[in-house]
Image (spheres, rainbow, N blue to C red):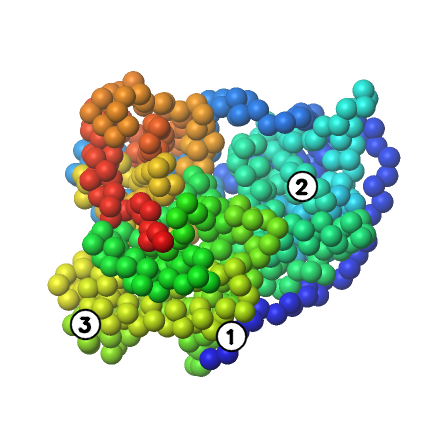
Amino acid sequence: MDPIALHENYIHRDSISSGESGQFDRPQVARLAAQKSQVSLVSNSLVLSRPPESTSGVTFVCSQPDNASMAASMEASIGGTIFSDSETAFHSLPETQPTIDLGFRPQKADMNDSENAFFVQNKHFFILSVAGKPIYSMHGSDEILTVHAGIIQTIVSYFEFNPDGETEQLRTFTSGDENKTRFCFLNKAPIILMAISSLDESELQLNQQLDFLYNFLLTILSKPHIDKVFRKRDNFDLRKLLGKADIACLDSICNDLANFNNPGLIIGGLECLRMRKSVRRRIENVLLAEKSENLLYALLVAPGGRLVTVLRPRRHTLHTSDLQLLFSMIFNTNTFRSTPEGNETQQLASNEEFWVPICFPKFNPNGFLYSFIQFVDLKDEKLMYLHDLNMSALEQDANPDSSKITVILVSAYKDSFFEMRKIASSIIKTVKLNRTIYRDLFKAVVGTQGANGETGASSGKVDPVEIPAPLVQHFVFKSKKHTQFVFSKLAHQREPDENMRGQLMMLYAKLHSQFSGASRITGSQHDSDFLDESHFINLVRWKHQNDNLVGFLITTTNYELYLLTNGGIMDEKVLLRSCKNIIKWCKKNQDRLFISSGAVF
């Protein structure tokens, strides 16, 4: 099959020149910013709204980031809890507990030309050139983007120079109202990025999000190419180089950032597929058998961007951020999807092959690598019959992409497609025909257990009840050594819907923003026996009527443990025992949960 190249699909937005920046003194700029940032609390939801006639005060922060300034303690009342119960014992909790709305509402990127719809959004992202030329906006039409690009460029330019002649960069400012809408800037000349958030996010969090968006631009264009076009013309319209697929991916990334959809972007790590160490080792041996001079990296990825294993050169690893960008491009856009005949839903194209040039900014921002990408559906009737797996999984009404693994081969040579296709074909054939590998992958990915894959739930996620971890409703355990994390199920096997998952991750984001103020435990890096009540730092407390939800973060030199307790039950001794159990369980199962080094050649 011939490779499917990703063609340049130029965006069809009208090319509109940016508005006049005008002349502003600092008070006028402050008033202008305040008018764009008024926040109100409506129906337990933080929303942007039109400002009153009076002007709010605005606090500006310039110069370089100061991590210490972001370590202030936080206690927030946001209007609700995720879990509500008045039981006094964990074992007596019902299978399904009622949920109380925190006010979180998923939002999606749009090109709405209504200013009212624009101002009601609680998260915005803007990208523009240093000349004020609009490049991208998460919300709003081209006309709205053009107006705001001019305003943003004016503010950034005005605060760039001090009266004493020294140069500094505007980092952030907050509106003076009680809800404190935060504006954050990232100046990567010739590109300027800006975020507006009324979700009580820290400067560090927003700065990391803007950096991720900037790195995506480097991923598709590379830094030398961006610098070159702006050296030739400083008011160049970069939208001419962005195809429809690129804009769709920007939309998808912004949706993830605004809705807290991606735990890896929040806590800085990758999630791996939970599976037996011996089987993972077999897969690594399959990859090692196919190593080639032109093959730089090989990855096997499960649905949801969960890494199965990786083949890499000795002393070379792909940065977590580069992999997150790659996975965002693959799994969160329609670029690699098709619509099967007789089906209205787009699915990952398992019958096609893709050859894609990608710049990995952390690996090398100045050049491209080339990725061969192919999807393999494990729900194959012939293979299931061959390996004695129960056919009932074929009848499950599930997301068709939830049973597909992804083979990714990375090469430094653009003419090595046919060699990469041959290697991928050999890897896929071995995975399909090796009984042990196929059966274990099937059980972990499709979500079955038992001798023939007939019973049980997915072994890829752990329920806090199984550990056991009384009082814990949900947890995330991150291994700093591996830069990987475990994302648990909700207690009692409940699967969160989009709203609940967003609320969960919003709470973890608040915990993560207080990282530098968290408890740092000394002693043995792996020993949990020395934990006591003094190590619990109540970083965030949410309250609604008589219900409470408390989030904790415990961090050592070797791990981070985020957890949420159920409604208002605070037995520190039981909670302490649960934390110890989680840490011990993750340590005991670390070979199944994390990839230590992968296949190295």
**Distance between the Cα atoms at labels 3 and 2?**
53 Å
Q: Which amino acid does label 1 sit on?
A: Pro
Image position, residue 439 (x, y; %)? 21, 65
Labelled disc at residue 3 = 1
Q: Which residue in the protein does label 3 denote?
A: 387
Q: Helix, strand or loop at disc 2?
A: strand
Q: Could you tell me residue 508's position as x and y percent? A: 41, 37
Q: Name the residue beneath numbered marker 2.
A: 188
Residue pictured at 78% horizontal, 28% vertical = 161
Q: How far apart are marks 1 and 2 (CA)?
A: 35 Å
Q: Badge 3, how many Cα within 10 Å: few under 14, some, many 20+?
A: some
Q: In this view, does 193 lie to the left or right of 594?
A: right
The structure residue drawn at horizontal position 49% and vertical position 23%, both measured from the top left corner, is 71
Q: Give the number of the mark in front: 1 or 2.
A: 1
Q: Which amino acid, mark 2? A: Lys
The residue at the point 72 percent across, 28 percent down is 168
* Residue beneath the point at 68% across and 66% down: 10
Task: Give left or right: position of 412 versus 525.
Answer: right
SS at badge 1: loop
Q: Earlier in the sequence, mark 1 or mark 2?
A: 1
Cβ atoms at labels 3 and 2 below 8 Å apart? no
Between 58 and 556, the one nearer to me in the picture: 556
- Closer to the chain start, of discs 3 and 1, is 1
Judging depth in this view, the residue of 300 and 561 nearest the camera is: 300
